[in-house]
């Protein structure tokens, strides 16, 4: 689904070659400054010839700030109608791109970021299935994840049994909707 993909990318911090141009960037010349991304923070940059150095603090899932420094290659080519157009070279796939997106600490091109995001989402979905499987094991339920949990194990309270089987059902529901989402993104 195109909409989802677009939304996904727009939610991420992005550095655009046009942002740098607004700051006076010209390919091959030295320049330094900061770029602020509305409400999402800012990064400092410096450019020397064909290297762009980015400096920023990355906030991880636990809210820790980590100083990051990334070097990105710049390149340029001639436009059809004269003049030069500058590009970033993605540090992962070395493609020429106009914009880079923050993905897990570093800036990469759109397709490299999408790949990273997809595998994150897939891990999340797999985790739901693993959790549900554990509960089913506890309840001595059959291996078929869709099978109804019929029997309460001996010695287990009814309350506990109901709670665990509810939990397993909720996990499976989440698992299937998550699975659908990752399939739609492919
Ligand atoms: Zn890339």
Image (cartoon, helix red, strand yellow):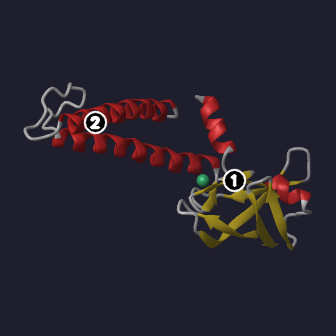
Relative placement, left or right, of 85 versus 149 is: right
- Are the residues flagged by discs 1 and 2 in contact, CB closer than 8 Å? no
Q: Quick check: 62 left or right of 164?
A: right
Is ligand 1 less than 8 Å from the beta carbon at label 1?
no
Which mark lies nearer to you, 1 or 2? 2
Query: Which mark identifies residue 66?
Result: none
The residue at 90%/57% (across/down) is 22
Q: Name the residue rendered at 58%, 63% in the picture.
A: 63
Label 1 SS: loop
x and y, in percent, of residue 178 in the image: 44, 34
Q: Residue at x 40, y 33 (%)?
A: 174
Q: What residue is pinned by disc 1?
A: 13
Asked whether mark 2 lies closer than 8 Å to ligand 1, one says no
Does residue 129 appear in this view? yes
Near mark 2 (Cα within 10 A), the count class, few <14, some 14-19 or many ≥20, is few
Q: Residues within 10 Å of mark 1 (few under 14, many from 20)?
A: some
Instruction: Say which residue label 2 marks.
Output: 163
Alpha carbon of mark 1 to alpha carbon of mark 2: how far?
40 Å
Image quarter where the N terminus lies is: top right
Q: Nearer the viewer, residue 21 or 26?
A: 21
Badge 1 or badge 2: first in the primary sequence? 1
Q: Position of residue 50 (x, y in %)?
A: 77, 69
| Label 2 residue SS | helix
Nearer to the camera, 136 or 59: 136
The picture places residue 52, in percent across and down from the top left corner, at 75, 68
Report the front residue among 179 and 170: 170
Q: Quadrant of residue 80?
A: top right
- Please indicate whether residue 43 sits to the left or right of residue 71 in the image: right
């Amino acid at each position: 689904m195109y909409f989802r993909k677009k939304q996904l990318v727009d939610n991420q911090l992005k550095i655009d070659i046009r942002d740098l141009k607004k700051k006076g960037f010209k390919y091959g010349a030295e320049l330094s400054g900061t770029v602020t991304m509305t409400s999402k923070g800012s990064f400092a940059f410096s450019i020397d010839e064909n290297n762009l150095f980015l400096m920023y603090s990355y906030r991880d899932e636990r809210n820790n700030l980590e100083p990051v420094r990334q070097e990105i290659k710049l390149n340029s080519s001639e436009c059809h109608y004269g003049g030069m157009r500058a590009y970033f070279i993605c540090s992962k796939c070395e493609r020429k791109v106009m914009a880079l997106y923050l993905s897990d600490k570093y800036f990469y091109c759109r397709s490299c970021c999408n790949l990273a995001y997809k595998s994150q989402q897939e891990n999340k979905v797999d985790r739901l299935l693993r959790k549900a499987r554990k509960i089913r094991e506890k309840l001595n339920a059959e291996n078929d994840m869709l099978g109804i949990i019929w029997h309460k194990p001996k010695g287990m309270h009814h309350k506990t049994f109901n709670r665990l089987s509810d939990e397993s059902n909720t996990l499976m529901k989440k698992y299937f909707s998550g699975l659908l989402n990752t399939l739609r993104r492919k």
